[in-house]
Image (cartoon, grey):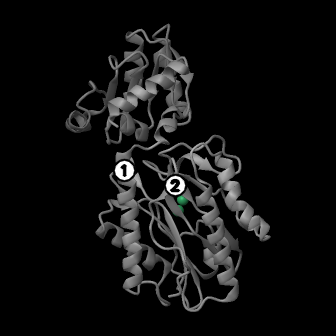
């Protein structure tokens, strides 16, 4: 889908929300709707047609904006959002939506001043409109996600083949090794700070790698992803160094069963909360509900965490083309934890797996 087609889809939402235009200040949304990847920009999208659509950015990006956004007039102005509000006022726009989930209080105050100078212009909160569009990916975006997932899969396979998961290495070394191997497989960089958590640390859901040394008998949990062309992959695998003990094997099998139930629950029209429940029930029935301390998953795309949230409190249903993670975990404080995570795309007949690394318990 071209940026112009996305702006067209946004216009339908603007009309439903009774807005004359949307001021887009979230840079990820600016990128989605225009193709512009610079670090300072705003976009004005009127509801009544392409005429009046404007991108604002500053002088550092004159050449880049012309190349990336050939189909929208570009305003070169350091205070991008203010310039576009003035522009909207001059164009006779009255109900101007703004991304209230993104704009700071100070930035909002500055925009109110500009609006006051344009008597009829009214700023209206309009959170999450572009995020709603972004939740459903087109095939080009899914291909980008697939490539990012493949880089992460290949990096882990290389790491294991090279004996990179062994007693004596530190969590930090393994994390750096994984990130380097993702780059070798085409990643622009890691999608987020790689998590490597060994032994008791594996019971900390978002543990940051330390100089802790991997030891024989440890569970080693790795949560990592590749960034490629703006799209993020997200995957977690947990392995055992040496022979797994009974409790480790039991824990792993429980989480694997919950993860499989979560994946199987994905489908068009399914409530997000019921996907969470499908996985959570497996863990709760085993008496471990309190030790699964986070939501089941999240949307993934131009951001590592985006709509929809797959959680007990999440609202809404899944649509074809949504890219989501399914990542249950059970964490036994002081002993160790297991999380298994895949990135998948919701399809009319279920879900397509994008992270293809196997999920049987690996004893290394
Ligand atoms: Zn993850
Ligand atoms: Zn995740």
How many discs appear?
Answer: 2
Q: Is residue 78 visible?
A: no
Secondary structure of the residue carrying tag 1 is: loop
Of residues 57 and 285, the one nearer the viewer is: 285
Left or right of 319? Residue 205 is right
Query: Which mark is in front, 2 or 1?
Result: 2
Residue 341 is situated, as x and y percent measured from the top left of the image, at: 55, 65
First reached walking from the N terminus: tag 2 or tag 1: 1
Q: Is residue 308 visible?
A: yes
Return the mark for residue 230.
1
Identify which residue is drawn at 35% across, 61% down.
189
Location of the N terminus by quadrant is top left
Left or right of 325? Residue 253 is right
Residue 110 is situated, as x and y percent measured from the top left of the image, at: 49, 25
Q: Is residue 244 above or below residue 336?
A: below
Residue that carries the numbered disc 2 in the rendered image: 351
Identify which residue is drawn at 31% across, 38% down.
36
Residue 151 is situated, as x and y percent measured from the top left of the image, at: 36, 66
Q: Is residue 247 above or below residue 95?
A: below
Q: Is residue 41 above or below residue 153?
A: above
Q: Is mark 2 within 8 Å of ligand 2?
A: no
Label 1: how many Cα within 10 Å (few below 14, some 14–19, many 20+): some
Q: Does the residue labelled 1 lie within 8 Å of ligand 2?
A: no
Q: Residue 207's quadrant in the figure?
A: bottom right
Secondary structure of the residue carrying tag 2 is: strand
Q: Residue 279's quadrant in the figure?
A: bottom right
Distance Cα–Cα, label 2 vs label 1:
23 Å
């Amino acid at each position: 889908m071209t940026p112009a087609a996305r702006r067209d889809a946004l216009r339908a939402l603007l009309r439903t929300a009774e807005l004359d235009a949307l001021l887009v200040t979230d840079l990820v949304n600016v990128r989605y709707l225009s193709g512009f990847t610079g670090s300072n920009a705003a976009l004005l999208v009127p509801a009544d047609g392409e005429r009046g659509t404007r991108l604002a950015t500053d002088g550092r990006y004159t050449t880049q904006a012309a190349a990336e956004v050939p189909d929208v007039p570009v305003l070169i102005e350091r205070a991008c959002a203010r310039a576009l509000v003035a522009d909207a006022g001059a164009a006779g726009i009255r109900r101007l939506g703004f991304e209230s989930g993104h704009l700071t209080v100070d930035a909002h105050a500055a925009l109110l001043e500009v609006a006051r100078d344009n008597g009829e212009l009214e700023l209206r909160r309009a959170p999450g409109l572009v995020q709603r569009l972004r939740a459903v990916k087109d095939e080009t975006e899914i291909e980008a996600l697939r490539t990012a997932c493949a880089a992460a899969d290949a990096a882990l396979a290389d790491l294991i083949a090279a004996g990179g998961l062994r007693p004596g290495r530190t969590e930090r070394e393994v994390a750096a090794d994984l990130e380097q191997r993702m780059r070798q497989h085409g990643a622009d960089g890691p999608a987020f700070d790689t998590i490597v958590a060994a032994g008791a640390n594996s019971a900390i859901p978002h543990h940051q790698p330390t100089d802790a040394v991997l030891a024989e008998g440890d569970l080693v949990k790795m949560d990592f992803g590749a960034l490629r062309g703006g799209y993020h992959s997200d995957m977690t695998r947990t392995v055992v160094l040496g022979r797994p003990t009974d409790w480790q094997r039991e824990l792993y099998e429980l989480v694997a069963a919950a993860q499989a139930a979560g994946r199987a629950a994905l489908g068009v029209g399914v409530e997000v909360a019921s996907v969470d429940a499908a996985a959570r029930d497996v863990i709760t029935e085993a008496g471990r509900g309190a030790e699964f301390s986070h939501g089941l998953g999240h949307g993934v795309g131009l951001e590592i965490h985006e709509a929809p949230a797959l959680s007990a409190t999440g609202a809404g249903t899944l649509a074809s083309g949504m890219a989501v993670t399914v990542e249950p975990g059970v964490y036994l404080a002081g002993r160790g934890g297991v999380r298994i995570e895949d990135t998948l795309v919701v399809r009319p007949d279920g879900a397509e797996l994008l992270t293809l690394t196997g999920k049987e318990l690996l004893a290394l």
